[in-house]
Image (cartoon, rainbow, N blue to C red):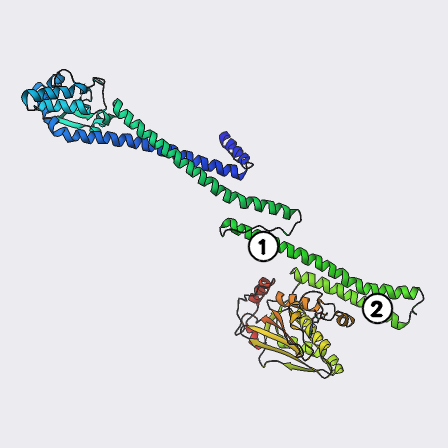
């Protein structure tokens, strides 16, 4: 428990160490482990292979040696005096001389002579059945015991009467190397070490390069994020790669751009609001001041004009509140299933007297079959009235306004077209922006706040629809918006895929609704 706690604390403290140091540590650790393990393994492998080589070599001569020794054992019943079989001085350095003498004398080589040669030159030892060394050309290991399982693996058994009475085994097979062999092994080990160190150094260099590649963009990102946090929203970082770091940099840039955009919008909006509120206030103040100074008579007309400005002011404040609620997705929608034709018809009736008075014809085009929709009728009426009053404002006497509603695929399409002057193409992208007005002086004098279309857009989108405008200068303007058909009605797509804020709300409500809409 306590070491675990200490480990946890240690790890937590490791969190304070710079990432570059940690990664370097990991790379170094991996290289070190790799070098150590591979060196050790290679060393072991060389020794083993060398021993194996010697064992195999001994095995090559086994047919000559084994019968000779088996014969000796069968004759005497033990290994005693075995060295005498081969002559007194079992010495590798003397072997050549003795062989030479033998050859000169007899011109033949007895099996004993052959055995002597092999044993002396290849360091072959003889162990008895229990593994005790009974014959060793160097006499260094005479009498020592070698475990039988080692002999079973590395030695060649000598069998007499079906019993293993001894083993021939080379000294190297038991990892007992003579000085020459030791020197050979040492030089191999040195080469392995040099190779491992060289590989380690290259790995370290490559690791360092990689580390730089990882750490440098992180540092840049850290620096940029810090500046951003201190209010410099223009911070961006270069994106060099398409990997996770590259994506992180991209996301950072996107986030910074969004922050900057919304900060600009916020600033502009405050400026706009201040400006819009100031204008009617200035007019009211100016007029009142003039009355106080005795410049103006407080006639009913002057008071009426002051009253009108104050009405504009309160409408502006009302619209602003409505817009900010709608933009925040907090405008309550009281949705119900209605026939949209009804809502459209009522809006038309509401504006009809004013249009008639102005001498503008209103054409209403509605389909025969109902247009079932799951909407807040008050809000959609608000949108319609806004579009209609804009159309009225811009349509000259003798002009025409067409109000249409129809079913198109899985949605309802409503449009308001007028025969007014239309909107210049360069202005089209801005008409739905708050406070945007084509002709500032004229629209303000006619009571326009520049918020009507912005609110209409929010309301339509809150219903899961889209609003757009089409216009060519001199040929009038057409504003159209869509609304999803109520779920369950024929042709309706039951899962509207629009990106509106209140989508879930409309969906959940429409699920409860009865499907007896055809009777609506
Ligand atoms: P406003 O309160 O000024 O009408 P809106 O948001 O309703 O604000 O409209 C914004 C601007 O869009 C108007 O000032 C006007 O320039 C333009 N606009 C809107 N409707 C029409 C239309 N039917 N014909 C021409 N221009 C229009």
User: Which of the two discs, 2 and 1, sits closer to the camera?
Assistant: 1
For mark 1, give the secondary structure. Answer: helix
Using the image, determine if residue 255 lies above or below residue 419.
Answer: above
Q: Position of residue 412 (x, y in %)?
A: 58, 74
Q: Is residue 272 left or right of residue 169?
A: right
Answer whether residue 125 is visible to the viewer in this image: no
Q: Quadrant of the C terminus?
A: bottom right
Q: Is residue 393 left or right of residue 199?
A: right
- Displayed quadrant of residue 382: bottom right
Residue designated by label 2: 307
- Displayed quadrant of residue 127: top left
Q: Residue at x 73, y 76 (%)?
A: 393
Q: Are marks 2 and 1 in contact (CB under 8 Å)?
A: no
Q: Residue at x 89, y 63 (%)?
A: 289
Residue designated by label 1: 254
Taking the image in four quarters, ligand 1 sits in the one at bottom right
Q: Position of residue 73 (x, y in %)?
A: 10, 21
Q: Residue at x 54, y 51 (%)?
A: 239
Residue at the extreme front: 104
Answer whether residue 511 is visible to the viewer in this image: yes
């Amino acid at each position: 428990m306590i070491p675990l706690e200490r480990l946890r604390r240690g790890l937590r403290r490791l969190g304070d160490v710079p990432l570059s140091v940690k990664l370097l540590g990991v790379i170094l650790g991996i290289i070190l482990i790799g070098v150590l393990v591979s060196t050790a393994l290679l060393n072991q492998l060389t020794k083993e292979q060398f021993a194996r080589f010697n064992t195999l070599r001994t095995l090559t001569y086994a047919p000559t040696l084994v019968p000779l020794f088996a014969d000796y054992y069968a004759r005497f019943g033990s290994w005693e005096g075995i060295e005498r079989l081969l002559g007194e001085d079992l010495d590798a350095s003397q072997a050549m001389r003795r062989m030479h003498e033998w050859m000169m004398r007899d011109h033949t080589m007895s099996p004993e002579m052959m055995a002597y040669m092999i044993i002396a030159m290849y360091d072959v030892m003889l162990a008895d059945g229990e593994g005790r060394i009974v014959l060793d050309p160097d006499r260094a290991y005479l009498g020592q015991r070698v475990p039988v399982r080692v002999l079973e693996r590395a030695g060649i058994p000598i069998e007499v009467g079906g019993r293993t009475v001894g083993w021939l085994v080379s000294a190297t097979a038991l990892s007992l190397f003579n000085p020459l062999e030791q020197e050979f092994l040492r030089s191999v080990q040195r080469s392995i070490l040099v190779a491992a160190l060289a590989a380690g150094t290259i790995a370290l260099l490559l690791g360092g390069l990689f580390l730089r590649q990882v750490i440098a963009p992180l540092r840049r990102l850290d620096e940029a994020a810090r500046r951003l946090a201190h209010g410099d929203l223009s911070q961006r970082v270069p994106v060099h790669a398409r990997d996770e770091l590259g994506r992180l940099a991209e996301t950072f840039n996107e986030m910074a751009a969004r922050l900057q955009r919304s900060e600009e919008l916020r600033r502009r909006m405050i400026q706009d609001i201040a400006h819009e509120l100031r204008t009617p206030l200035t007019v009211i103040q100016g007029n009142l001041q003039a009355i106080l100074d005795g410049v103006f008579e407080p006639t009913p007309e002057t008071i009426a004009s002051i009253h009108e400005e104050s009405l504009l002011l309160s409408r502006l404040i009302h619209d602003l509140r409505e817009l900010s609620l709608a933009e925040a997705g907090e405008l309550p929608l009281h949705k119900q299933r209605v026939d949209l034709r009804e809502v459209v018809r009522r809006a038309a009736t509401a504006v009809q007297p004013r249009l008639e008075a102005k001498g503008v014809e209103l054409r209403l085009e509605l389909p025969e079959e109902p247009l079932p929709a799951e909407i807040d009728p008050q809000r959609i009426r608000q949108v319609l009235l806004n579009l209609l009053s804009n159309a009225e404002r811009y349509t000259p006497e003798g002009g025409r306004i067409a109000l249409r509603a129809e079913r198109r695929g899985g949605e309802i399409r409503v449009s308001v077209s007028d025969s007014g002057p239309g909107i210049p193409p360069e202005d089209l992208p801005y008409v739905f922006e708050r406070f945007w007005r084509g002709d500032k002086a004229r629209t303000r004098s006619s009571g326009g706040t520049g918020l009507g279309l912005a609110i209409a857009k929010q309301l339509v989108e809150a219903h899961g629809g889209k609003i757009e405008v089409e216009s060519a200068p001199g040929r009038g303007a057409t504003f159209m918006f869509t609304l999803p058909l109520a779920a369950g009605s024929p042709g309706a797509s039951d899962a509207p895929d629009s990106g509106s804020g209140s989508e879930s709300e409309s969906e959940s409500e429409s699920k409860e609704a009865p499907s007896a809409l055809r009777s609506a």
